Image (cartoon, rainbow, N blue to C red):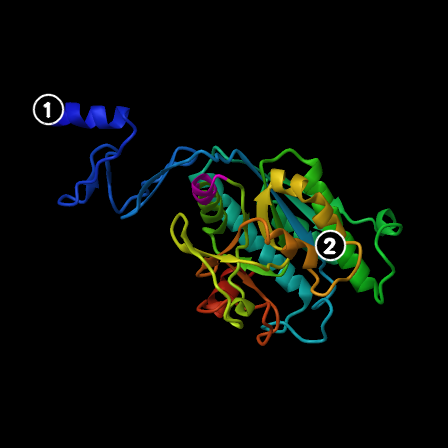
Amino acid sequence: MKKIFIKIIKLLGYEIIDQNKFISPTLNKELSEELSEINKQSIVLPLGQVSITRKVKSLLIIFRMNTNIEIWDQNKKRLFENPKIEYSMRSLNSLIKSIKHLKKNLPMIKLKLIILDDHSNEENLKKIKEISKQEESTEFDYLNYDKYNNYIKKQKTLETFSNLASLLNSFEIGKNKTEDLVFFVEDDYLHFESMLEEMIKSFERISSQLKRDIFICPSDYPYLYMNNEKTNILIGNKRHWRTINKSLCTFLTSKNMLDKYWNNFKKTCEDRHDPFEKYINEIYEKEICISPLKSLSLHLTNINSSYGLAPFINYKYLWDENEIK
């Protein structure tokens, strides 16, 4: 009778929890195991099951890279005070680790990595290409300043122009591709191995609950705690997330959102606004953007920057773990 009951429950689309034996008979798993199933259901104890209606099929990662500029728009030094190429290398290395983790655990998700390079010298580019060999889906694209001379307004420095041009180029790449989700990521972030898996699983869980696509920022920035702003706390796959109304230019969203708010993305790049992300932040007045508690990525800026180091992270460990040997 017990076996028949379990079969009936499964056919009805429900799961059973045996808290005495700490197992799920319908899933045939211990409760300490991974209970969620991509594109089918998300299970978080003790909150129960969320049926996945917003399924994720593919992911495009656009890694925007400048190996020459130490810190754009600042004269400060980054944490650990290394040459910029060192941050780019470790950032890419940590990203590829996260890609490998994603492929291992979610092999059904189609993935492509595009590295958009902003005029790296030959030596730096050679180092980056050597690291990129770890990921077979990698493609390279190269920024052409001339393409944007007639759109981007004249800037005080070439560094500002190049930042705007590379950002617009990355948005155009995302818009012209067909992948379901797009992750725009800069080359001064270190990522935890689980970052991509957690973002994708949390995207589909929360989007399915809200019945709408969302934006996800992988870093928990200091500036989010400097004002007494109200926020909502959401449950993702294996951590809490908070709603935010500002982000930098490293975030994940859907191709649908990129198309829907294309004017905002394009206007972001026409001039140096204050704040820089002014027109991206405008989107969050209408759409949901979330960041993780605690952080999945570490923005390696100056230690005093409000846009930099996420709290409660072992910075030195993450830095050393991604050294290129």
Give coordinates of residue 261: x percent, y percent: 67, 44
Q: Residue at x 68, y 47 (%)?
A: 115
Give coordinates of residue 30: x percent, y percent: 23, 42
Residue density around tag 1, few if under 14, some if 14–19, many if 20 or more, within 10 Å: few
Residue pointed to by mark 2: 268
| Amino acid beneath label 2 | Thr
Which element type, helix, strand or loop, lies under badge 2?
helix
Tell me the tag on residue 149.
Answer: none
| Left or right: residue 206 compared with residue 284 | left
Residue 304 visible in the picture: yes
Which is more N-terminal, label 1 or label 2?
1
| Left or right: residue 129 compared with residue 163 | left
Residue 19, above or below 188:
above
Tell me the tag on residue 1.
Answer: 1
Structural distance between the alpha carbons of marks 2 and 1:
63 Å
Would residue 210 be counted in the magenta stretch?
yes
| Left or right: residue 79 compared with residue 36 | right
Give coordinates of residue 316: x percent, y percent: 49, 69
| Left or right: residue 49 compared with residue 181 | left
Residue 120 visible in the picture: no
| Amino acid beneath label 1 | Met
Which element type, helix, strand or loop, lies under badge 1?
loop
Quarter that holds the C terminus: bottom right
Q: Nearer the viewer, residue 142 or 322?
A: 142
Q: Residue at x 59, y 53 (%)?
A: 284
Q: Residue at x 12, y 27 (%)?
A: 2
Q: How many marks?
A: 2
Mark nearest the camera among 2 and 1 is 2
Find the magenta span and give its range: 205-211
Residue 197, above or below 81:
above
Residue density around tag 2, few if under 14, some if 14–19, many if 20 or more, within 10 Å: many
